[in-house]
Amino acid sequence: MLLAVQLVSLARPAYACGCGAMVHDPKTTIAVNRETSVVRWDGKSEQIVMSLTVDGTAPDAAWIMPVPHRATVRLGDRELFDRLTALTAPAVEPRHYFWPRSGDWPFGGMSDSAGAPAPGASGPGVGVVGRERLGPFDVARLTATDPAALRNWLKSNGFQLPASLTSALRPYVTQRWEYVAIRLAPAEAHRPLTGTLEPLRLSFASDRLVYPMRLSRLAKTPQSLGLYVLAPHRMEPRSAIGGAKPEVFFAGRITPRGALRDLGGSHRTFLTAIDQRFPQPQHITGDHELLRTAEDTPYQRVTYEDALLRVGGVPAWMVTVGGLQVLLTAVTVLVIGLRRRRPGTPPVGVRVPPPPG
């Protein structure tokens, strides 16, 4: 897959992933081995679908995500990520070579070697606007006017957060953003939290396409972000926000089908797949805002399949070399034949009489 598909590796303690903050008991470990995010924006509302693959010894963990407006939360569809992986896969094009390589006869067997590489109760200043159970998730939707109050409420409800999160949340509190707080737990009690979790789908009003990234600056290891962006036009981040230059690995118009149709409607939409690395997460300066590009230029990666050039099933180099040998043999035979057919030259000093008449 994104980004993608996209990978996020976290060391203990894990305070952040690509979108939001993830925390756990410091006596345990947890790592987000894979994070895939799909963003759908139509100019008025935004949807984010996230799927996390986690591993470690923690029996549970907490994940906090800030959102600009009140969000609705429900489970997502796993099929969505399969379809996006297929849509953004590199195009495969054949590429032939003439002379044999290692593995080709006479340097190996008669079969060709494959050239293609192997191939997402409230306290002061806090309001609880909703709490629900979605599959294995305990989801709380919150408002807050004081970051310390938010931290205390989350702590009293089982979400153990580091003190540094108070300052990290302050800009969101200032902007009156809300939060989705989720307790992640394994399907069976007392077992470590491992494997791919059910996707979560968040929907909220937004007149601009934003992807929360500010909390990722709490991460202790390099981060990797991958986004599938569905919008009316090709999109790009306004800036790198402290990371490496974002790279587009797919851009093009698609017709949503299946889970994609449920997310983006039946009309053709533009899909932009973006990958970005953050070698030093502490340098992240804010959230991603994505803007329309000047042109809806399509792009797709290309993977080449190298194969020995053949003619009628026979390696072309053998045909060429064999043909040259046949040609040289034919020329040699022709020259010898011509020499044999030429009349003999008389010996020196012998007079040849003129023909009669």
Image (tube, rainbow, N blue to C red):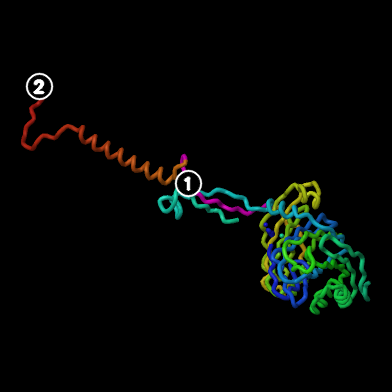
* Residue 261 seen in this snapshot: yes
Disc number lying in front (1 or 2) = 1
Q: Front-most of 54 and 87?
A: 54
Left or right position of 63 against 86: right
Rendered-image quadrant of the N terminus = bottom right
Mark 1, residues whose alpha carbon is within 10 Å: few (<14), some, or many (≥20)? some
Quadrant assignment, res 278: bottom right
In the image, residue 310 sits, relative to residue 170, either above or below, namely above
Find residue 158 and report its horizontal and vertical position in percent.
85, 73
Element at label 1: loop
Q: Front-most of 285 and 138?
A: 138
Find residue 26 and report its horizontal and vertical position in percent.
75, 77
The amino acid type of the residue labelled 1 equals Leu
Residue assigned mark 2:
356
In the image, residue 197 sits, relative to residue 169, either above or below, namely above
Q: Which residues are magenta?
A: 297-312
Q: Which mark is residue 309?
A: 1
